[in-house]
Image (cartoon, rainbow, N blue to C red):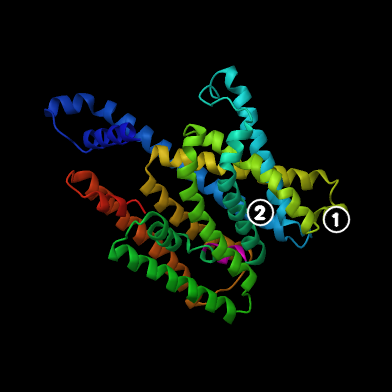
Amino acid sequence: MSRAQLTRTGILRMALGGGGAPAAAAEGGGGRRAPFLLRALRIAVVVCLYWFTSIAMVFLNKYLLDSPSLRLDAPLFVTFFQCALTAALCLGLSLGAACGPPCSGLPALRLDPKVSRSVLPLSTVFIGMVTSNNLCLKYVGVPFYNVGRSLTTVFNVLLSYLLLKQTTSLYALLACGVIIGGFWLGVDQEGAEGTLSWTGIFFGILASLCVSLNAIYTKKVLPVVDGSIWRLTFYNNINACVLFFPLMVLLGEFRTLYHFDKLGSPSFWGMMTLGGVFGFAIGYVTGLQIKFTSPLTHNVSGTAKACAQTVLAVIYFEETKSFLWWTSNLMVLGGSFAYTWVKGLEMRKVQEDPNVKSGERNETGV
């Protein structure tokens, strides 16, 4: 990342006229502009790919979880299938590593029971995260989905203090306050419009908590898999598939599947497979966006994507929302952007000041 950032900084300086004689600048101007334009084009393509994958995955999952035409009441099975497909894709790409580019950089994968047991605590949180995300989407509309899961940042701050003893600046806490205000205003407006689902709100809050816990446990478990995100994804999804089985039995989802009239439909399995592919791809394109931009830019892009997703959902489902409903969304998005901006400034201050205390360094890591 540091090398990419240095390269980007150098290109920007050259493109904006950073030194050299006029003749030399004129002679090399075309060469300087070309790499800058090429990099800008790459970033635009990666960001668009991230937006498309993320938004498409939400709409597709909404169809699989709560479509009147599909009438499938088996959210755990949908999540289980996506986890199984993700594990299979990881294994398939690993086996293709021997074929050379573009798979040559992927690590070899094999199932080690000892590593699987070490990853199990994270897998439990992971199951809670993906299941509560899908259940939130099942019970709330896509337009409200972003607000329903908007407390992740708040839980990040809270858990960082409780578990990691990291403090947070006043400005970041104020941004969290704006997010909480937007969340409660959104809940109030959903109730006023008669579309409020307390079940969906519960799973949205649970999803926010699990996302925060997942980030913390991921950092702790990564050394077990030699720091490889691919290996962690593989073991996480394998463990999830095993753990989902007893849950599906307890909730009677196998009986639901037995009586499901579209179980033999190729179009149904096509949509299920597409949902699994998007679920796998979102992790890859997220990594690409961070690689070609920065973690800070990724967060800003995610906030803008959530805004676009909300507008598209309102248009697609032909819903009419009140001014206060839109205000709640703007508060959540604005608070999330403000938090990202504040943390970015704090991180830059830490990088520029080598004499910053270790406690202050921890504060910027929330």
Seen at 41% across and 47% down, the residue is 298
Q: Is residue 277 visible?
A: no
Question: Which region is colored magenta?
Answer: 141-146
Q: Position of residue 332 (x, y in %)?
A: 44, 66
Q: Splitting the image into 4 quarters, where does residue 210 fall?
A: bottom right
> Label for residue 52?
none
Q: Secondary structure at mark 2?
A: helix
Quarter in which the C terminus is drawn: bottom left
Seen at 45% across and 53% down, the residue is 302
Amino acid bearing label 2 = Asn
Which residue position holds label 1? 255
Q: Secondary structure at mark 1?
A: helix
90 or 108, nearer to the observer: 108
Compared with residue 100, is residue 310 higher up or lower down, i.e. above or below? below
Q: Is residue 102 magenta?
A: no
Q: Assess disc 2: are there few (<14), some (14-19) or many (≥20) residues with their C-alpha within 10 Å of its C-alpha.
A: many
User: Do the residues under discs 2 and 1 have CB atoms within 8 angstroms?
Assistant: no
Can you name the residue that lies furthest to the bottom here?
192
117 or 122, nearer to the observer: 117
Seen at 64% across and 31% down, the residue is 111
Can you name the residue that lies furthest to the left here?
21
- Which is closer to the viewer, label 2 or label 1? 1
Q: Relative to residue 232, is residue 294 drawn left or right? A: left
Amino acid bearing label 1 = Arg
Quarter in which the N terminus is drawn: top left
Q: Position of residue 108 (x, y in %)?
A: 57, 24
Q: Is residue 13 visible?
A: yes
Q: Splitting the image into 4 quarters, where does residue 70 fall?
A: bottom right
> Label for residue 61?
2
